[in-house]
Image: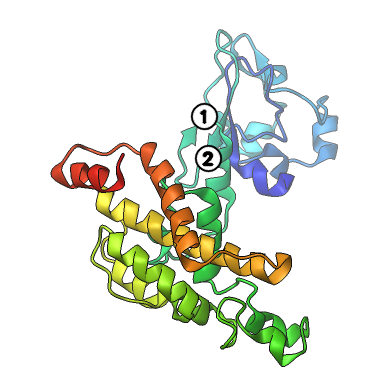
Amino acid sequence: MRGIIRPFIIHKVGNGLNTFVWHDTWTDYGNLSNFFSFREIHRAGLSNVSKVADLIYNNAWNWPVGWSARLPMLLNIHPPDSNVEDIVCWKNADGDLVEFSTRVAWDSLRSRAEVVMWYPIVWFPQQIPSHSFIMWLLVLEKLKTQDKLKPWEVNVSSASNVCVLCKSQQDSHDHLFFECPYSKHVWSKILDIMPLQIVYDKWKDVFQCLYGVANRRVARVVVSKILLSASVYFIWQERNSRLFNNGGRNPDQLFKAIILTVRLKMRSLKFKESHHVRDLRLKWNI
């Protein structure tokens, strides 16, 4: 990773005692090792680990004879200040020098793509992280439903491809959210308490409905997104519980589990006071 990270690490030279002349980026021209060979460096009486301070004499540059003529840009580098220590900075994605942090480094190094419309429905500050993860897999259609596993011959019998919640149709993303009679029953009860007016019973249609308001931070939108992700999470959890543990809750029990989780989450949320917020608190007994 050194070759990838090095261009983002910039040294602001003070006294030059902690900055390597050849290998650190401390000029506007990049690493000076790109301009001089190791043989030339050693011939000038310097070494691979020379510091910037080794090239300063009486607060002025002391470049080897002929180097400034060969590379005139050396004359444009301001002499260091012996009263100030060297500072190491991080150059972010916008080219600005900032204090290093793992967040800034990740943002500078990560691969980038176009922003997708669904991101504020899946990733938002008030979200429950484990719920966001399952929502992310859902929107990418990467949850390991039986139709996804069938090409890998994980379960080859036709009976094993049936939804464990309704035992009548094939297990798939579209069926599970929310065409399955079990999940449809749960979702219909969620819609009755959803702060936003949503009438759709298919997850793709629900996402389409939320695109226009998902970025808003008002209580109605945030609580609706939390309810949606909690519903997806618990339905997926129930599906796995029945598939692997032979357990199970009826739709009403699952609905109560969703409501309990969302209510606990809502207790930690803070919104600007309004009649909508007061109505939500009253409705949820918070």
Q: Compared to 55, does 123 lie above or below?
A: below
- Apparent side of residue 178 relative to residue 198 in the rendered image (left or right): right
Residue beneath the point at 44% across and 56% down? 256
Residue beneath the point at 25% across and 48% down? 283
Q: Could you tell me which secondary element the residue under label 2 belongs to? A: helix
> By what rule are the colours in the image chosen?
rainbow
Q: Which residue is mark 1?
A: 99
x and y percentages locating residue 182 in the rendered image: 49, 75
Determine which of the numbered discs, if any, sits on residue 280 in the image: none
x and y percentages locating residue 16 in the rendered image: 64, 19
Give the quadrant of residue 191.
bottom left
Q: Earlier in the sequence, mark 2 or mark 1?
A: 1
Residue beneath the point at 55% across and 61% down? 134
In this orientation, which residue lies closer to the viewer: 7 or 67? 7
Residue beneath the point at 81% across and 31% down? 48
Q: Compared to 68, does 45 lie above or below?
A: above
- For disc 1, the neighbor class at 10 Å (few under 14, some 14 to 19, many from 20) is few
Q: Residue furthest bottom?
A: 158
